[in-house]
Image (cartoon, rainbow, N blue to C red):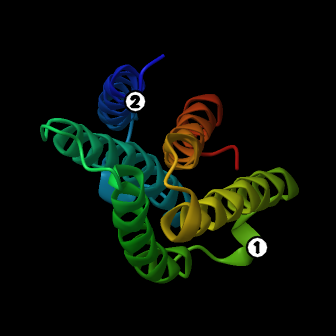
Amino acid sequence: MQPSEALDIVAQVAVTLAGFAGIVVVFRPEALHQWSALDRFRLRLLLINSALPLVFALFAILLLSIDPAPTVIWRWCSGFSLVVDVAFLISGRSLSRSVSVPDLNVTTKMIYYSVSLVALLAFTLQVINLVRWNQFWPFFFGLFVHLVAAVVQFVRMIILSPARE
């Protein structure tokens, strides 16, 4: 599969997940401002982890449209994703503080830390790709991790009713 085809698929999946977030909001019985802090945090994670892969994929598609394509294209993509991910991490720290630790059960903590560990691996691969490799697969792995995190949040929001957690 060519990188452009993979990026097209990532963009389609990211848009679909963002649309599913809208469906979750519409079909919940209470208004968004009445949701618990944990549910609002999950919705933010779902939206951010849907939007970032879309932005990253569009950026890569933009660079692929340059004729001839830059030889350091995947370094640029990894650098762009690192800058945006660091901004996401900094802003996410204040969002995560809105959720109190007693609100989190063991399953939620396990999922959160597992996804965080894989995200750290993706972040590390992006740094190495920026500095040394210039390969497509580390950049794509970062997109993959964001999409998996979004799917996890979507499934948890659908399976868990607002009062169950």
Q: Amino acid at mark 1?
A: Pro
Q: What residue is shown at x 64% (from left), y 58% (from top)?
A: 119
Q: Amino acid at mark 2?
A: Val
State left or right for residue 110 relative to residue 66.
Answer: right
For disc 1, the neighbor class at 10 Å (few under 14, some 14 to 19, many from 20) is few
Of residues 136 and 37, the one drawn nearer to the viewer in this rendering: 136
- Point out residue 30 in the picture as x, y percentages from the top left corner: 37, 43
Q: What residue is shown at x 49% (from left), y 42% (from top)?
A: 136
Give the answer, above or below, for where 163 lies relative to 67: below
Give the answer, above or below, for where 101 lies relative to 26: below
- Point out residue 151 in the picture as x, y percentages from the top left corner: 55, 34
Q: Secondary structure at mark 2?
A: helix
Q: Secondary structure at mark 1?
A: helix
- Point out residue 89 in the picture as x, y percentages from the top left corner: 49, 75
User: Which of marks 2 and 1 precedes in the sequence?
Assistant: 2
- Give yes or no for contact between labels 1 and 2 (Cβ–Cβ under 8 Å): no
State left or right for residue 146 relative to residue 111.
Answer: left
Extreme-right residue of the structure: 106
For disc 2, the neighbor class at 10 Å (few under 14, some 14 to 19, many from 20) is many
Give the answer, above or below, for where 71 lies relative to 69: below
User: Which picture quadrant has residue 112?
Assistant: bottom right
Q: What residue is shown at x 50% (from left), y 48% (from top)?
A: 139
Q: What residue is shown at x 34% (from left), y 38% (from top)?
A: 25
Of residues 51 and 158, the one drawn nearer to the viewer in this rendering: 51
Q: Which disc number belongs to residue 66?
A: none
User: Which picture quadrant has residue 125?
Assistant: bottom right
State left or right for residue 75 relative to residue 106.
Answer: left
Residue identified by numbered label 1: 102
Residue identified by numbered label 2: 10
Of residues 71 and 42, the one drawn nearer to the viewer in this rendering: 71
- Point out residue 129 in the picture as x, y percentages from the top left corner: 55, 60
C-alpha distance separating marks 1 and 2: 35 Å
